Amino acid sequence: MHPTSLMMTSSLIIIFVILTYPVLTTLSPRPQDPHWALSHVKTAVKLAFFVSLLPLFLFLNEGLETIITNWNWMNTATFDINISLKFDHYSVIFTPIALYVTWSILEFASWYMHADPDMNRFFKYLLIFLITMIILVTANNMFQLFIGWEGVGIMSFLLIGWWHGRADANTAALQAVLYNRIGDIGLIFFMAWVAMNLNSWEMQQMFAVAKDMDLTYPLLGLIIAATGKSAQFGLHPWLPSAMEGPTPVSALLHSSTMVVAGIFLLIRMSPLMENNQTALTTCLCLGALTTLFTATCALTQNDIKKIVAFSTSSQLGLMMVTIGLNQPQLAFLHICTHAFFKAMLFLCSGSIIHSLNDEQDIRKMGGMHRLTPFTSSCLTIGSLALTGTPFLAGFFSKDAIIEALNTSYLNAWALALTLLATSFTAVYSLRVIYFVSMGHPRFNPLSPINENNPTVINPIKRLAWGSIIAGLLITSNIIPIKTPIMSMPAVLKLAALTVTILGLLLALELATLTNKQFKPTPTLTPHHFSNMLGFFPTIIHRLTPKLNLFLGQAIASQTIDQTWLEKSGPKALTNLNLPMITTTSNIQQGLIKTYLSLFLLTLTLALLISY
Amino acid sequence: MASAYLTHQQKVLRLYKKSLRHLESWCIFRDKYRFYACMLRARFDENKNEKDMVKATMLLKAGEEEFWTNQHPQPYIFPDSPGGTSYERYECYKVPEWVLEHWHPSEKAMYPDYFAKREQWKKLRMQSWDKEVAQLEAETPPRRPQD
């Protein structure tokens, strides 16, 4: 075997071994070392990151991609299920990024969760999540992808409900599971269709055999799966509710890695989607709707974590728009750059929350720039990267997406909604910075504000470096599969920057108005629409259970009795026989004398005729 | 002595406090809040000497309706209060006292003083149990005939 490919495959197997070893050590009956979390788990992830750089550099240098089939699980004459790992462009780049972000988050979590008696278990859950995420990303067949898909869903449930004594946390965890389950229906439908019609779950065979087939139904199933996992409109409420979990969970799962699994699935299946215009248009419109709706909801939220959660949902909508433009590589680029600055935004929020004694409401923050200068600077850098400030990480992906949208001849409404959402991104980012970092403190002076801990500063610093240079690094080293459109009118080229600057100026104007004595409340109707999340959870979370419960009650108390008694049992017999009985008994009128005389007459006539 | 019914004064004061809290949720900056809070206080003070209870109740009703239309959909709730972000967060770590009985002897040996004192406390509790029950029964008011 060629030494380069041998190096690649061995380093990838080593990554799996390094990550699974700490989980296996927890199975031993010996009591765990209290510093196990920091000494074993964080070290394992750090080591795995450095090992994963070798396949990355091999890929960048030689374009080496590899598929490893490790174990034949079930092989029939026509259908194979194997454990096979695919290390192509997407997984080779995503794995180091996921490991880098996880390493930083684990280090931060050792500070954030240090007062938690079960910190070791917390780190174990995060590590199991990371393993299942890498299984999902490196899967070469749908079965393995499904294992990873369900695994990340389960770990999300366990981690959101970490403080399970809290009723809201349990509700949020259940919400996440239910909404993801609805998405799983789409994925299972896709897998069933593919197993029946394309006769394999291996991706290479799927793409080869499906060349001229009509794939609308399975692709719609995939889109439903992505809607559930990546919180697109319709199945999105679980993402803001998932903020009930601790901040490291929100940073890892619900911003960088798990929620992009749906988009990643669509990127993997992009060879199937590129010829199906229905699927592409659905993605485009769904993504545009999602990005605008969630950006609108983020405008008036007051919980800092919810603002960042809606921001994540909005960026996921943007990734969906990119898939709809048939640009999976651009969507992947946005996944990579988004992971850095979104995780950093969450870590900065977590640092501020802990410093202010678990205060999450931005109405009670303020002046953090003088009190925690490093954290608020990184918050600003993250927000600038999010809004697509030129030459930071987000610029390379976001600007490219909007340019592609501008120069395509597709849906103009999608374009308008996306541009509006881009300006809203600038508005709510400025709102966060204005209320958190600027002005004077609005909280109790007795707060444990302390930035001197290296376990907090180093992760944020690493992610800040990532937010600044990741975009440049990735775009400089990756050869694009589709040529981007190089020349366009200046208006189109500068559209994203213009709407962002307009949004920023508008937000600054509104922020200065907030401080003046005009009126205490804003115009209530649009504010309520945005604040109550478009009334979507209010309606759906009450209507659907109510309808189901009424249906259940009707079936249990009426339908069964009605079916067995009135439609098929005793009453049915009665209802069938009674008309016949009444008709028959009503025929005779009770005229006995007439009947008797007629009888005697006919008897006499019969006797006379016969004799 | 509290009963099931609120007095008029209690209702007015509750309305005043929740209006102030919701006003604080709307007016984020303290100087703006102080201005509108003083205006609100002036509005309440205008009618504070009303002697006609019917008119006072109508004013209270109008005030409650105005509160309902102008309330904040996400009022500021302190983190440890019901509905707050940290409320009940540590319930899952709270265990009842009798769990200490079930500790392994090697674990109990780590805190010999505490468990020794605990044994004494349990003995005292057994001795005074009857006296405590008798005292509680003496203090409990008799049940109403209609229960």
Image (spheres, coloured by chain):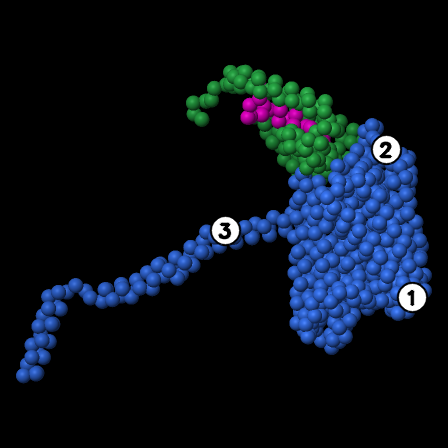
Chain colours: A blue, B green
Q: Position of residue A228 (x, y in %)?
A: 70, 56
Q: Which residue is mark 3?
A: A553
Residue that appears at 10% across and 66% down: A593
Of B80 and A437, nearer the camera is B80
Write down the region rendered in magenta: B1-23
- Name the amino acid type tagged 1: Thr
For the C terminus of chain A, give its image quadrant: bottom left
Identify the image quadrant of residue A489: bottom right
Identify the image quadrant of residue A53: bottom right
Residue that appears at 62% across and 24% down: B10
Left or right: A377, with A20 as reference point:
right
For the N terminus of chain A, give its image quadrant: bottom right
What label sits on residue A449 in the rendered view?
Answer: 2
Q: How far, Cα to Cα, is label 2 from label 1?
A: 50 Å
The residue mark sitting in front, 2 or 3, is: 2
Of B85 and A78, nearer the camera is A78
Q: Position of residue A452 (x, y in %)?
A: 90, 35
Q: Position of residue B32 (x, y in %)?
A: 80, 32
The residue mark sitting in front, 1 or 3, is: 1
Q: How far, Cα to Cα, is label 2 from label 3?
A: 55 Å
What label sits on residue A4 in the rendered view?
Answer: 1
- Name the amino acid type tagged 3: Gln
Q: Is residue B15 magenta?
A: yes
